[in-house]
Amino acid sequence: MHLLIGVLLISGLLAVPASGFAVSAVEPDVPNVKPAPEPRTIDQEIRLANDYFTGHGVPQDYQQSVYWFRRAAEAGDPQAQTQVGYFYDSGIGVQKDPQLAVHWYQLAAANGSVGAKVNLGVLYFWGTGVQQNQPLAIQLFREAARKGDGLAACYLGNAYFSGHGVPQDKVEGEQWFAKGAAMHNPQAEHDLGLLYFDAGDHVHDVPKAAALFRESAAAGYVPAMYSLGLLLVRNPGLAKSPNEAVRFLTDSANAGVWKSSLILGVLARDGMGIAADKGAAYYHFRVSALQGGEEANQLLAKDFQVLKATLGTARISAIDSRAEDWYQQHHNALEFVYKEGENWTRFPDYALAVPADGTHTIQMLPALND
């Protein structure tokens, strides 16, 4: 079951009573940093905290970001309280501490933050920093969904579809996906689209799936970029332009989806919709193997054997080097990307990365400063 914690810097999240937690004056691992010029309002503190987090107009400094979010959080701002909870949840700027994450999410939820309620529900669902209580998690998701949170609706869809925390009921799961999609949540749009596109026991409606994937991809959801690219390869008549499938596959490959790189290699190998180019095919296959590890290598073993014999040692070595260089700039597996322009070649302006440590806390990555 796929439940990940959202990030308030990018998306807002909902509310439970704080169960006996009190706000401490100073937590021991909050850095004692030299403050910047004193902002006058909570909004200014939050703006400065965001600037330090992203390196916008100031040197990037996670500890300064924690300092200013903490200032706003102690003044009672639920947005800042949720963000401080996320810092403790993910270990950004402070030592990772799931119990303190619960504490700050509860405070924010009690102050009306829908997002904090959703994040708190995820922690209860998995038993992270708190005793596992899936019925309470489901209750929190329901409360959040009733207040219009599409992510909570999507989580309910996943719970019912998989039978985790509730009796399995795929019909109700789909209904929750539809509610989340109606709230324009990109994960719900994508999950609902998958049912119409590729679920064996579901009515297929490929144009409807394409429309849902496009909405989701436009919001920066990387799995939707891959799914839309694959759908358009299989159904080229639904493409809005000749290169649309390649564009979405390239974007999702840049975000770490190894299957997108593999498909790009197949297209180049076979000349499907693009010019046949064995060098390009090997390059995409090599990137896919770097991204996907053993699973990708096993699938590509025969192609590697054939292409290495065709291209020769010198060219293979040059392509390997180029693929390694590219991978060093795109090694994160991303869940979301946020960008101002249509094209990004090194890193998006903002990204949410799939957790690499086995937890369920999605990791925010700000833009890299060259």
Image (spheres, rainbow, N blue to C red):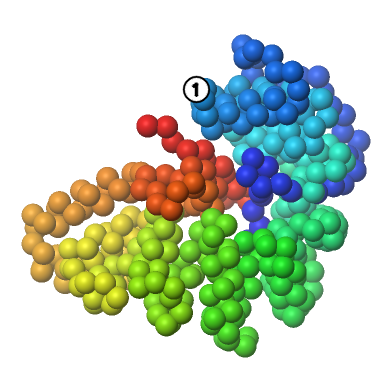
Circle 1 packing at 10 Å, graded few (<14), some (14-19), many (20+), is few
Q: Which residue is mark 1?
A: 59
Q: Nearer the viewer, residue 183 or 191?
A: 183
- The residue sitting at 42% across, 64% down in the picture is 248
Q: Is residue 174 left or right of residue 366?
A: right
- Image quarter where the C terminus lies is top left
For the view shown, which residue lies furthest in the front direction? 241
The answer to whether residue 367 is above or below residue 64 is below
- The residue sitting at 21% across, 53% down in the picture is 320
**Position in image of residue 339 (x %, y %):** 49, 47
Instruction: Kindly indicate the quadrant of the structure image that contains residue 244.
Output: bottom left
- The residue sitting at 51% across, 51% down in the picture is 337
Does residue 93 appear in this view?
Answer: no
What amino acid type should be assigned to the residue bearing mark 1?
Answer: Pro
- Image quarter where the N terminus lies is bottom right
**Position in image of residue 80 (x %, y %):** 73, 33
Instruction: Give the SS element for disc 1.
Output: loop
Q: Nearer the viewer, residue 38 or 174?
A: 38
Q: Nearer the viewer, residue 281 or 92?
A: 281
Does residue 251 appear in this view?
Answer: yes
Instruction: Kindly indicate the quadrant of the structure image that contains residue 183.
Output: bottom right
- The residue sitting at 87% across, 41% down in the picture is 110
**Position in image of residue 169 (x %, y %):** 76, 78
The answer to whether residue 115 is above or below residue 312 is above
Instruction: Kindly indicate the quadrant of the structure image that contains residue 109.
Output: top right
**Position in image of residue 37 (x %, y %):** 64, 12
